Image (spheres, rainbow, N blue to C red):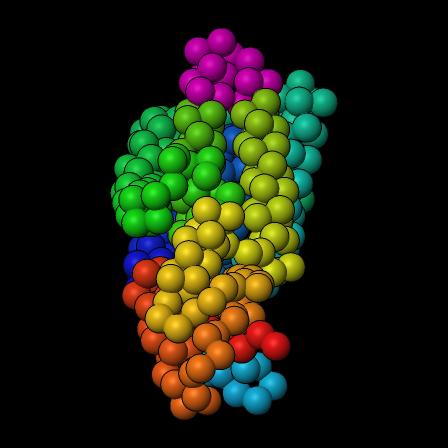
Amino acid sequence: MAGSTGVVIAAMFANGAIAVLKFFGFLLTGSPSMLAETYHSISDTGNQVLLLVGIKYSQQEANRTHPFGYGKAQFFYAFLVSVLLFGIAGWESLKHGYEKVRHGGGETEAGAAEFLGYTIDIPLPVDPFWLSVIILLGAIGFETYAFVKANAELQRQMEQYGWSGYREAFDRTSDISTLTAFTEDTVALVGLVVALIGIFASRFTGNPVYDAAGAIVIGILLMSFAVLLAIENKRLILGESLAKTAEEDLRKIVANGEGILGVDDLQTTFVGPQKVLVVGDVRFETHLTPAEVDLAIEDIENTLREADDRVAFVYIEPAD
């Protein structure tokens, strides 16, 4: 939890600062790609805020109405991110870029920006184009730092749980905060490169359509990420189990316990990020007293938690 929280906080401050810089870059140049990137960074910042709210909410103690805690709150807030933030920002970027392309790349004069129905033209003693480039390069630097931090946490989980690569990590991880930050930073870096290519192409060809096309690409990236994030959260909100191999390992641990004749049933489900509920029906040796069965169950619970730190709740019932 501490690792994912640090990743989210670092990304939030970086993206907030980048959003402000990008918006000034848009005001100075009128670049559609820069406005699309502004929407992108605002979305990223709002994303981190919602994820932090989810992390804080999920830390509430379990109670009668929520016996397994509030861990799934993170899945819910991350789902809100995908629908309310990235979907909307992606659509706005796509729409803005499309309108500019439809009008030949834009009708404002060079260096002027159209925003909320107003034309803004800020005269500067230096070429605003190069200021825009510097802003984007600085944003790439910040995003690279955030990406490295998120990647390090994801790599740690991949090594700890034996995942073969990013594909399996995406399919198996329940740490939705780290997953969101990693994917978001990847999309952000790609979007920044697209924005740079768009404004350079428009600058050196004199055709603003390239810049507007960059905004369309960024919008598509954002909406694609929204769909990906929604799918990942869906599986966790519905209650996904551990991977088959991990579940089989837990079953073997139970079956090899002292006084165990066999395991009739064992099921797992995520009840929060990196928190798993394990439920099993176990056949004990018939000569064991009720007190000895209780001790055997306690040993099983402790052994399962030691074997996999994601195991948070264990309920073992003696089979009839």
Taking the spot 59% from the left edge, 18% from the top edge, the residue there is 209
Answer above or below: position of 58 versus 221.
below
Depth check: 197 or 147 in front? 147
Question: The N terminus appears in which quarter of the rendering?
Answer: bottom left
Depth check: 38 or 125 in front? 38
Q: Residue 26 at x, y = what percent?
A: 48, 38
Depth check: 221 or 36 in front? 221
Q: In the rendered structure, does residue 205 fall within the stretch colored magenta?
A: yes
Question: The C terminus appears in which quarter of the rendering?
Answer: bottom right
Q: Residue 220 at x, y = what percent?
A: 61, 32
Q: Residue 278 at x, y = what percent?
A: 50, 67
Q: In the rendered structure, does residue 86 fall within the stretch colored magenta?
A: no
Q: Residue furthest top?
A: 205
Taking the spot 34% from the left edge, 75% from the top edge, the residue there is 299
Answer above or below: position of 153 versus 2.
above
Secondary structure that dominates the magenta span: helix
Answer above or below: position of 228 versus 314.
above
Q: Residue 96 at x, y = what percent?
A: 65, 35
Q: Quadrant of residue 227?
A: top right
Depth check: 11 or 297 in front? 297
Residue 318, visible in the rendered structure:
yes
